[in-house]
Amino acid sequence: MRGALAGFAGLIGLAGPSRGAAQPAGPPQPDLAQPPQVIRLWPGRAPGALGDEDRDTPTLTLYRPFGRPYTTAGGATAGTAVIVAPGGGYAALAENHEGRQVANWFNALGVTALVLRYRLGPRYHHPVELGDVQRALRLVRARAGEFGVRADRVGVMGFSAGGHLAATAATRFDDGDPRAPDPVDRASSRPDFLVLAYPVVSFTAPYTHQGSATNLLGADAPAALRAELSAEQHVTARTPPTFLFTTNADDVVPAENSVAFYLALRRAGVPAELHVFEPGSHGAGLALADPVLGVWPALLATWLRTRGLLTRPH
């Protein structure tokens, strides 16, 4: 049993070196007791902010993987970063089981995770939320060296309404403004990969999650705005490679959302992988205690590995 545990620890980068082994050059291991770092998306008041409270201040919480950055000799991390957008119907944030826990899981794979706290309705409406996730993508890419990641390995993952925000970011992006005075704004807001977990996608279909649509757009949003924020209608060949999972049993955000987005990706020639599980309620998070749905994290890890995102750059 002890040998099995040691093998698992070595797999995820936690096993210590054998006695007498030569140590690789580089800075010391980070203090694992150090709390995650909270980073404001803007140094001052965020654009469009209605106040200075926490709810008015979008942030990223940085969770670093164990081991040295990929740029050092003997580094253990993959140089990949993922911004995680928790769900909550655009009215709340499930920051634990769709944020912190997910970040810790990514860290075990050697991936740097940053949990996004974006502004919420009904206090804030579109395009504020989209501006928050776009700024997050630009910031991570602009500060990639500081975070120990590569600027071409920055993805976004979203759960439920956070999935809608992630899908919107993946279909409505720009390459940055090279003339912007803020160097962050010069960076691209296009994600390099996309992961969607039981996502809200369409605001025009009969299966629309009306609560998310109302909180994001207001009660009387015009049809044109609903169509503009229906990500399945805006997929192009530049939409990033995507992994999706959902469940047949989800009666809150039906699987049709994921299927519609997958089919749009397929038509556009974008690499995509979709998993529809039969059981599983909405909001399951990692679902590690579920013998069926709990398989999805392993499937995602395989997808990331296949795309080279878990391999340390040379």
Image (cartoon, rainbow, N blue to C red):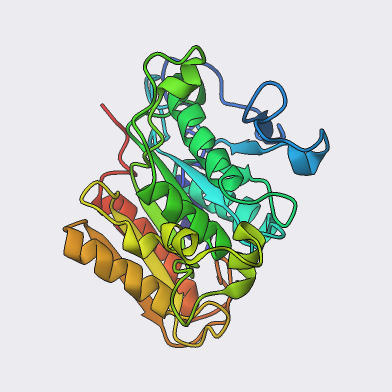
Q: How many marks?
A: 0
Where is residue 79 shown, x and y percent of the image? 39, 33
Where is residue 237 shown, x and y percent of the image? 20, 50
In-front residue for pair 122/242: 122
In-front residue for pair 81/34: 81
Above-or-below relation of 266 to 103: below
Q: Residue at x 50, y 81 (%)?
A: 291
Q: Residue at x 59, y 47 (%)?
A: 129
Could you say which quadrant of the image residue 201 lies in? Answer: bottom left
In-front residue for pair 79/175: 175
Q: Residue at x 56, y 35 (%)?
A: 64
Q: Residue at x 52, y 38 (%)?
A: 65
Position of residue 189 in the picture relative to residue 307 (left or right):
right
Above-or-below relation of 34 to 265: above
Where is residue 91 shown, x and y percent of the image? 71, 60
Position of residue 196 in the picture relative to residue 266 (left or right):
right
Where is residue 97 shown, x and y percent of the image? 65, 61
Report if residue 301 is visible in the image. yes
Quadrant (top left, top right, bottom left, bottom right) of the C terminus: top left
Report if residue 20 is visible in the image. no
